[in-house]
Image (cartoon, rainbow, N blue to C red):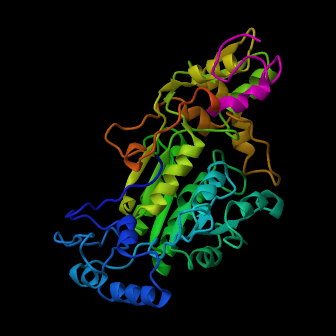
């Protein structure tokens, strides 16, 4: 259900998708003939690279009856799609034609996205700033020699340029949920994405996918979401054909939402919620978002669009905490509803000292101004926005196996009860 959809059918006037081009070019075409066709199509400017400057495929074009020569002569756009050189069945030993630079590959979402893009036969360039032990798990996600890792800094334009200049696809998933003394939200969410988009445009990268957050808005009271919105605008200004992905809160084995609820429940007598805990959201399984990014990478028609990726069910923060209590079999769960102004008073020393001391400070989960302010609004997908449906993906339900990882917090042991979504006692 996760394969991306082609945009052109028959006499459609939309830009030809990668899938149609793959049908037009036989898989067993000799290398010399393939290169000749590639040069011919490029000379005649058949396929669009940039959605902001693309023109339409001729209304009279018929993929089932038109020869390659006719195809090259009868249409007018700019260049070839990223997956033009596709060969094989689509597995890890195939050649997808994509060379993708992925920023943020060691993050929560990054590892899942790298896995799906790499195992479809793509070459991957993974710039990181961590040690080998923290990125070695990414090496086996693609075929031998297809995963290349390198050092970079988000403040070093030259290393960023070096990382992307060989790629036809760039995915940016760099982000922070809290500020540190070295990196502010402005640095990570605005300055770097803007610089990356400018560099991609400069070196001729064909596609740019920028991962933001659902709820990104200049009017959001949280600095996190304000800077996310500013970063989206900066990317669109520098690279108009960029695809913006705005996922909701991510749920998965390494998440920082349900895991935090479960850990606090197992350690403390009560778990605090901001105000009344009625902020609404649509949490989504992290692997579904990774599949969506893979679909976007492989489908040229997604260029220049914004996708809001959210789960199918609406929860409040209170609902999620109570569900966590049921899953880990808490006998007498206790929730404390703390007014936001009190939490801000508790967070004030950390906010004040963050950039005033010469050493890193521990950041208590949920005890930052940005997180506290974010709990005063809802994070729901707009009905008219693009999402999983347009990518041919059905998001997984939250209950059940998706959150089975919470069983390790169960009071009566891992195997107490049947499955994660049940409410039966041990």
Pick out the residue farthest to the front: 28
Q: Is residue 340 above or below residue 29?
A: above
Q: Is residue 85 above or below residue 426?
A: below
Residue 102 is situated, as x and y percent measured from the top left of the image, at 60, 64
Of residues 110 and 393, which is closer to you in this image?
393
Of residues 376 and 245, which is closer to you in this image?
245
Q: Which residue is drawn at 74% across and 14% down?
A: 330
Residue 425 is situated, as x and y percent measured from the top left of the image, at 73, 10
Quadrant in which the C terminus appears: top right
Residue 378 is situated, as x and y percent measured from the top left of the image, at 46, 31
Q: In this rendering, does residue 174 appear at all?
A: no
Q: Quadrant of residue 57?
A: bottom left
Of residues 253 and 157, which is closer to you in this image?
253
Q: In this view, does 353 lie above or below 401?
A: below
Count of picture labels: 0
Q: Is residue 133 left or right of residue 387?
A: right
Q: In which quarter of the image is residue 343?
A: top right
Q: In this rendering, does residue 282 appear at all?
A: yes
Q: In this view, does 30 lie to the left or right of 24?
A: right
Q: Is residue 379 left or right of residue 49?
A: right
**Magenta stretch: dominant secondary structure:** loop
Residue 5 is situated, as x and y percent measured from the top left of the image, at 38, 55
Of residues 177 and 343, which is closer to you in this image?
177
Q: Give the range drawn in magenta.
A: 402-426
**Does residue 412 show up magenta in the picture?**
yes
Q: Which residue is drawn at 48% across and 49% down?
A: 2
Pick out the residue farthest to the left: 60
Q: Which residue is drawn at 66% across and 37% down?
A: 368
**Does residue 223 show up magenta in the picture?**
no
Q: Which residue is drawn at 79% across and 15% down?
A: 269
């Amino acid at each position: 259900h996760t394969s991306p959809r082609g945009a052109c059918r028959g006499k459609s006037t939309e830009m030809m998708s990668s899938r149609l081009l793959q049908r037009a070019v036989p898989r067993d075409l000799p290398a010399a003939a393939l290169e000749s066709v590639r040069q011919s199509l490029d000379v005649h400017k058949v396929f669009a690279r940039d959605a902001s400057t693309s023109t339409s495929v001729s209304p009279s074009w018929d993929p089932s009856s038109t020869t390659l020569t006719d195809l090259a002569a009868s249409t007018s756009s700019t260049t070839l799609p990223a997956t033009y050189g596709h060969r094989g069945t689509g597995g890890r030993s195939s050649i997808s034609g994509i060379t993708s630079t992925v920023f943020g590959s060691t993050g929560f979402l990054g590892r899942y996205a790298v896995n799906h893009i790499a195992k479809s036969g793509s070459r991957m360039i993974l710039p990181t700033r961590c040690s080998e032990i923290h990125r070695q798990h990414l090496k086996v996600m693609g075929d031998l020699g297809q995963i290349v890792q390198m050092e970079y800094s988000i403040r070093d334009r030259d290393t960023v340029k070096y990382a992307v200049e060989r790629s036809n696809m760039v995915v940016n998933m760099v982000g922070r949920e809290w500020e540190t003394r070295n990196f502010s939200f402005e640095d990570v969410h605005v300055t770097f994405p803007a610089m990356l988009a400018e560099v991609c445009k400069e070196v001729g990268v064909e596609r740019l996918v920028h991962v933001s957050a659902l709820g990104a808005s200049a009017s959001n009271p949280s600095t996190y979401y304000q800077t996310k919105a500013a970063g989206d605008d900066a990317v669109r200004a520098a690279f108009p054909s960029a695809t913006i992905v705005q996922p909701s809160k991510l749920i998965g084995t390494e998440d920082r939402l349900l895991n935090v609820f479960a850990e606090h429940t197992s350690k403390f007598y009560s778990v605090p919620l901001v105000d009344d805990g009625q902020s609404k959201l649509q949490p989504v399984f992290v692997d579904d978002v990774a599949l969506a990014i893979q679909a976007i990478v492989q489908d040229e028609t997604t260029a220049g669009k914004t996708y809001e990726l959210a789960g199918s069910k609406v929860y409040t923060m209170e609902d999620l905490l109570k569900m966590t209590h049921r899953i880990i079999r808490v006998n007498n769960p206790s929730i404390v509803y703390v007014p936001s102004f009190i939490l801000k008073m508790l967070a004030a020393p950390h906010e004040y000292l963050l950039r005033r001391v010469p050493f890193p400070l521990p950041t208590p989960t949920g005890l930052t101004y940005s997180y506290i302010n974010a709990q005063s609004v809802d994070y729901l997908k707009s009905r008219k926005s693009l999402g999983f449906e347009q990518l041919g993906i059905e998001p997984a339900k939250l209950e059940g196996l998706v959150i089975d990882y919470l069983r390790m917090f169960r009071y009566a042991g891992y195997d107490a009860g049947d499955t994660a979504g049940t409410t039966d006692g041990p």
